Amino acid sequence: MAGFVVPGGGVPGLLCRFHSNGRGLTGSSWVGQRILGRAGLQWKLPLGRPGRASQWFCMSTVPATGVPKVQDRKIGEVVSGFELVRDELVEEISSAARLWRHQTTGTELLSMINSDENKTFGIVFRTPPSDSTGVPHILEHSVLCGSRKYPVKEPFVELIKASLNTFLNAFTYPDKTCYPVASCNEKDFYNLVDVYMDAVFHPRLTPDTLRQEGHHIEAESVEGEKSIKGVVYNEMKGAYSDPDRVLAEYSQRTLFPDTTYGVESGGHPHDIPNLTWEQFKGFHERFYHPSNARIWFYGDDPEEKRLAIANEFLKEFERRDVTDSRVQLQTPWDEPRSFTFGYDAGKEDLGKKYMATLAWMLPEIDSSSPELLLSLSVLNHILLGSSSSPLRKAMIDSGIGEDVVGGGLEMDLRQMSFCVGLKGMTQDGPAKMEKLIRQLIQEFSESGFSQERIDASINTIEFSLREKNTGGFPKGLSYMLSSMTTWLHESDPLVPLRYESPLAELKSRLAAKEPVFQELLKKYLIDNQHRCFVTLIPDSEYARKEEELERERVEQELRGKSQADLQEIVEISQRLKEKQAAPDRPEDLAKIPTLTKGELEKNIKTVPMEIGELSGSTILNHPLPTNGIIYMDLTFDFSGLSTQQLQLLSFLTSCLTELGTKRLSAVELQQEIGRTTGGIRSSTFVSQMVSADGKGPAVARFVVRGKAMKSRFPELVTLMSDVLLNVDLDNKERFRQLLIEEKSGLESSLAPSGHMVAASRLRAQFRISDWASEHMGGIEFLFFLRDLLKRVDSDWDTVARDLREVRAAVVKRQSTVCNITAPESDFREIRPTLVEFLNQMNSTTTQGIRSWTEDAGNELIVHNEGIIVPAQVNYVGKSANLIDLGYEPNGASSLAAKHLGTTYLWDRVRVQGGAYGGFCRLDARTGTFAFLSYRDPNVTKTIAAYDGAAKFLREIDLNEEELTKSIIGVIGDMDSYQLPDAKGFGSMLRWMTGEADEIRQVRREQVLSATKKDFIRLGEALEELNRCGSVVVVASEASLDQATSEGLDLPRKRVF
């Protein structure tokens, strides 16, 4: 996934809710791509949302510190069986880059030497599938289920429990499988590397591994019901419940029908049961060989150690010819093609749920020049990078559909592509859409783009490249994924890491008035006949047909089976369950390398903060190195709003930078933000003050975040002031367009994110901050948006008045907290500009109204609920507030809860139950505890598993070694790696909620001193949850009917 960026950087340990639809970060670089991840969630950023343009050249994090001094080496020098073949500096990422080749196996190893403490390792194999049985995806799961050196059931889970990792996962792409890890602790880092290397080269693969992770027929008795189960099988049933993903998948597969990209690497539910043990085992033998691997190291660890550990695993292999793993090229078509597929869109408004994309195949990435690749990235941003981008805006303005889909430029496959489309169309919409897109591209090719638009996109991409901010994603991993786009295909791995030369060349061509982007449009889109038009047609019977197909598949598998054969199926099911339930031998668990308790840092990590006042507003400054960038966060209190105003603010937040101002149109505003800053985005933050009863006062803040180079800070402040004080709230059509986009985006996210829906509905029953979160971003918010759309059409003047009242009630000087993250000297320099800005804000009070906090307090009602969505899998939640039940959570409670999730729930809900994920969450601030499952084939069985958790903890047999492992894992969570902007922002949030460093230190000490009694105490509290907890299930109507027949009759709410 080239140039993958995860904005934001989370706030470890701070349990709160943010609301933002992702539209607000104008000019940011996002990637919408499909990756299948190991840990239970699919790595996928929504396709086609504003501000999410693919960027190929990599981005990282942390201020530049210069290339470190490294030991001199000579080309041809041999160290630990590796010969040095290349030694260069990559100044753009402050790294020395050395390419080594293993003399025996031919394995290439890229050693990136720098001063980054967040060390990263990855081993990547080319794994092109020939069918849609999902063999690379199932194998990705399976190799982490025990190995020669570490013969336990789940070494991966043991590492989650007992390491300080900053990243631990595995990814399946359409053409490769990646196994990356990261840690700031050198010993911990090499422990992770050792386990992963043994896993990929020496996994304990058996037919039962395939049955568990892939597929098997499950039966409890010869006469009983029989069904298909398997972790990946259920994961992919969930994946195919996401219409956006389905459209993206079909768009790729139809564009490359004659290559590996023409099949589903993750596995299609129709095809997964066809995978045999021989194919499964053979795929590993064929592709998981050192000669087919690329190895990556990055960070400040010793290079000799990297080479030595790699050689230990490689030296027992011989070189092999792996040319058969190379990805073959798709032959270009002579004429465009069209395809139509059905999909599950629920039962209502099917006439408005057509979806379609138009996609072009572009040149292969490994033979394209860096300047062409960067130019295509910039063109992509010009066309689709923000809501004001001309292609995106024209498509939305046409009224043909509700929202843009397609993802734009795809640069991760060997042959690139460009894909764009619409969803929320009527039956005649797709044809109109295709005609419109081609017409627009023709117009852009002839007329070009304004200089302002080009400058905005160039600056946005250049700022991202120079800022080097990947949020909470390790920058070394970002670099690795970028390098693999070329390296995997026998091309230069350093090309994606270098941007100065292609950027200078592009700027030079543009300065010479060359029609760079017009030529690209003509060559790669207008004159390109390799074009594919894909339409998804809503089918009200789709879910029923899929259920029938699965039943027929089971019947087909059983047809002709003797009683002995059926008995064998039962015995296999029973054997699997017994294996899954059997504990690992203590002597095998002891083989997993880990740190000791004495090697853990005893004290919390603190962030320097200075508190002051300017112009009646509170000012926080975090003097941290930021490489010349000023990060500014403005927050305003909205605890005094009414419930309706609360929801209106939530939507206004999502489109604040897209409405335009009295001075600038929406297009001009977006261009100015892109041209002069690193981005402006807005969101809301809702939590509660720390208190013993979990019922502290609500903390409700409207947040506007911006960043710019210090020299551009006055322009950033001017734009933020314009957006806050002069936003255009009179443009009905623009407001309506954005409202439709928001509604459409929320609707399409419900089925694939059902666990989040269930969690939100459950938490909203216990605390006012969570009640607000549901009303600002959950199903209640969706209902509000639908009603608001009707109001806009029938009573716009009142809506506009309400918007102005909300803005005036929130944006006030006396409620402002301004947070600056920058060195002290930079803060002093920008201070006068800041004072001038703050003086512009209103300082008057507004008339008192009934606050949403009063409504919330009256509506905290515990109840069960079934949410009906179009999905082939279920999301099951059960929750209660433990403080209300008499439990007093502390730091050790989080330890016990994490242990419960990585042991009992992993085994019972995922491994035995077949769900893709099973976990629990304890909000130590409010006391709310929730069990949740993800892409789950069960409902009542999962709830029964939840109810068994209390007994598991009360009777736990926890030795000192296992306790220490759990402590290490929780300390790792507490100390997760953060960048300066995230450190400053997180520190501000802790200050606002009263989470003092002293409180954090006490919690840390409670974790470090935890005992078995803390686990038992949580188990006793969960006994009460069993008795009075509420249940929310997000599922299809058929699944809820099945649950009713099994004794769980839930009141139902239909969303579609």
Image (cartoon, rainbow, N blue to C red):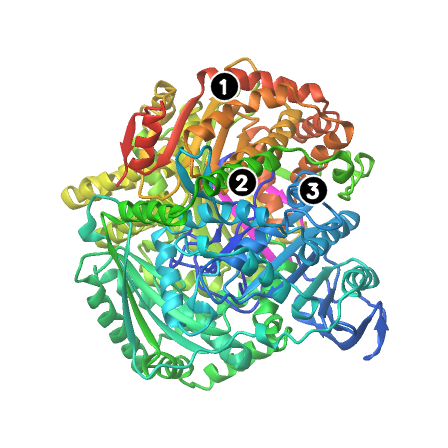
Find numbered disc 3 in the image and state the secondary structure of the residue it sits on: loop
Most foreground residue, 11 or 43 = 43
In the displayed structure image, the side of residue 459 where residue 983 appears, left or right: right
Residue 418 position, x and y percent, is: 39, 71
Q: Which residue is mark 1?
A: 1025
Most foreground residue, 582 or 571 = 571
Q: Is residue 628 visible?
A: no
Q: CA distance from mark 1 to mark 2?
A: 34 Å
Q: Which residue is mark 2?
A: 572
Q: Residue at x 67, y 27 (%)?
A: 1003
User: Label 1 is placed on what type of residue?
Assistant: Leu
Q: Earlier in the sequence, mark 1 or mark 3?
A: 3
Magenta-highlighted stretch: main secondary structure?
strand
Q: Residues within 10 Å of mark 3 (few under 14, many from 20)?
A: many
Q: CA distance from mark 1 to mark 3?
A: 32 Å
Residue 990 position, x and y percent, is: 58, 34
User: Label 3 is placed on what type of residue?
Assistant: Val
Q: Is residue 279 visible?
A: yes
Q: CA distance from mark 3 to mark 2?
A: 20 Å
Q: Earlier in the sequence, mark 1 or mark 2?
A: 2
Image position of 711 with respect to 1032: above or below: below
Find numbered disc 1 in the image and state the secondary structure of the residue it sits on: helix
Residue 896 position, x and y percent, is: 64, 27
Q: Earlier in the sequence, mark 3 or mark 2?
A: 3
Q: Residues within 10 Å of mark 1 (few under 14, many from 20)?
A: many
- Looking at this rendering, what residue extends furthest in the left direction? 794
The magenta stretch spans residue 161: no
Find numbered disc 2 in the image and state the secondary structure of the residue it sits on: helix
Q: Which residues are magenta?
A: 619-635
Q: Residue at x 44, y 42 (%)?
A: 935
The circle drawn on residue 152 is: 3
